[in-house]
Amino acid sequence: MHRLIENAKCEHRSLLETEAKELLQDYGIAVPAFKLIQSESEISTIREYIDYPIVMKIVSPDIIHKSEAGGVKVNIKDEMAAHKAYQEIIAGAKAYNSEADIHGVIAYRMCPESTEVIIGMLQDPHFGPVIMFGLGGIFVEVLKDISFRILPIKERDAEEMISEIKGYQILKGIRGEAPRDIPAIKEVLLKLSKLVMENPEIQEIDLNPILVYKKGIQIVDARMIL
Amino acid sequence: MKGFFYPSKVAIFASMKEGKTGYEIVKNMVEGGFQGDIFPISPGANEDIFGLKVYPEHQGLIFDLAIVAIPAQYIPPLLEDLGAKGVKRIVIISAGFSEVGNIAAEEQIKDIAQKYQMRIIGPNCAGIMNTKCNLFTSIEVRALPGHTAFVTQSGALGGAVLMMAEELNFGFSKFVSFGNRCDVDEMDLLAYFETDPETKVIALYMEGLTKGREFLAQAGKTAQKKPIVAIKAGRSRAGMRATSSHTGSLAGEDKIYDAAFHQAGILRVEGVEEMFDLCRALNYYTEIAGNRIGVITNSGGPAVLTVDKLEELGLMVVEPSEVLKDDLKSILPPHVSLGNPFDLLAYGGAESFYEVGKRIASEYDALITIFVPTSFMDSTVIATALGKLKSETKIPIFANFMAGRLVKGAVRELENYGIPNYETGERCARVIQKIYQYSKRLKDE
């Protein structure tokens, strides 16, 4: 069992965002550089790892809906703003749930906007682990424009999953826009397949949103439920 | 598995009173012309039926297949008896097991089967058939001979399909209603039909799976050899899982079945009508090498509908090359369209269908031939021309002769040549798309 999963299991909780991202990195899936801040004094060290502007989010297994708890601050431009954000996030979290076990605040670089996709996994009662792909935002929420495959997947499956959604045209580039980095999406699907097959303790995964650029992609948020 | 389908002596345990299950099964077996011995067994019965003696008990009789349709509570002791006797193949038609919540009874018969290494089909099923040896251990209408194996979870739907098939003159190699599948399941049956020389196509009706991953592994293997066409009922049922992730809330059961079937190479169809359409074609053609479809027609409207459907399904109604156009010019009247669809207009006769088909075959992967008879034209002549065309070209040819009694004779003629005919070109298109999908999947493996 992966040490991160073993540790979380001991504590009877799911993986924290920082742990989920670390696990992704272990499988060669790149995530934006991040740092877990556990006290206000650590804020001065952020710039050693990450360039401003940054995003800061609460890290607590007891707070799932982070925005509701005032636990998400974006576009933080400098260290001074980071101090303010940190204080507000911690205060907000305590007000939201005084019992919450707070592991700290995750800081990562604010990624420029781009086409959003979502990749997920769930354990199906009949077929076992299943992977999902879709375009983010209204495409997934309203139009349910998503594709599934039973894991593990092969390269062809990953290609089909991407090309069979209706929004594929958007990834290929519409109205003169440059195409998005489809091979990078394919790579994440295949690496995630391996991650899931080797870590059967994971029940559900949401990588949402993933920002897809002309070159490269950024997995902004990652959730893994044990 | 073969033991179920090629028995030499069959015992039927059921009420043999007129109109009862046993009586109907024996009737089907006798009228169907089963060559082996048939032993009707029913305690207390003393009259012969269909020229066969009805035995009060099985002691002293030797048989290798038992069909059981007695009340559920009498089945365990009977199985013990049969087990001790060395009978290895049992079909249990009787209901009253897990489907009504009587799980204990089903576990009990499973245990007995295991103890004696017997195999059981059922319980709660409609029996099995093998047209090769006239085995009809079922109360349902007897299947006509053919090369499609039909495997169904629902007995009632199975019966209805056999009835519809009879109307369509569509035959089966084997028929299996597996009911509650306490022992023999979809995996066993797929593995058997994969090697059954009488079976070219496997048709499957299912409501739910218990061993999803095992099923996919077996189906994936079988589909490499023979096409599997499946109806999965319960399309509309939304995902009913308890989840906390976004992904979980989006995953409907049906979408996951779609993905699973696709990965295994199973051709999923909407319903019985599409199942027949596809199985009929797969008996003749299991491969369509590419997606370029040529349409030859003698009328505009139906061709437009067909082309629309082809394109909607991602198939290519590509134009012929210039060389081919020149070639066609030399044989067709000047005002006939030289594009795809190739519209021969109302006077397009047998000769034109044959000549155009012959010439364009090299540039297309499949042909749809649409024919709407006019008052001065005999449609069987067109069918004959297409038969000749089929024997001289390599690509699959489909027909859409319209319609009804006007083309009845011609359609029969087409069947003789192994050209599947559909009442609409849209149905041709759907079938072509599925076969193309199947061949593409096989090629990519």
Image (cartoon, coloured by chain):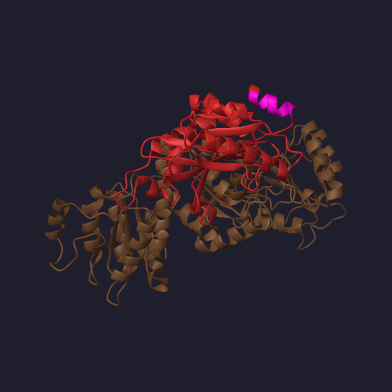
Chain colours: A red, B brown
Main SS of residues in magenta: helix
Residue A222 visible, this orientation: no
Q: Residue A177 appears at what percent x and percent y?
A: 32, 48
- The quarter of the displayed image where residue A195 is located: top right
The residue located at (73%, 36%) in the rendering is B88
Left or right, B353 with reference to A133: left
> What is the quadrant of the C terminus of chain B in the image?
top left
Q: Residue furthest front?
A: A80
- Please give the range of residues in magenta: A4-11
Q: Residue B359 appears at what percent x and percent y?
A: 20, 53
Q: Residue A72 appears at what percent x and percent y?
A: 58, 42
Residue A163 vs residue B34, the one in the foreground: A163
- Residue A8 magenta-highlighted: yes
Residue B243 vs residue B331, the one in the foreground: B243
Q: Residue A149 appears at what percent x and percent y?
A: 53, 41
Residue B144 vs residue B271, the one in the foreground: B271
The residue located at (63%, 40%) in the rendering is A89
Residue B68 visible, this orientation: yes
Q: Is residue A71 above or below residue B277?
A: above
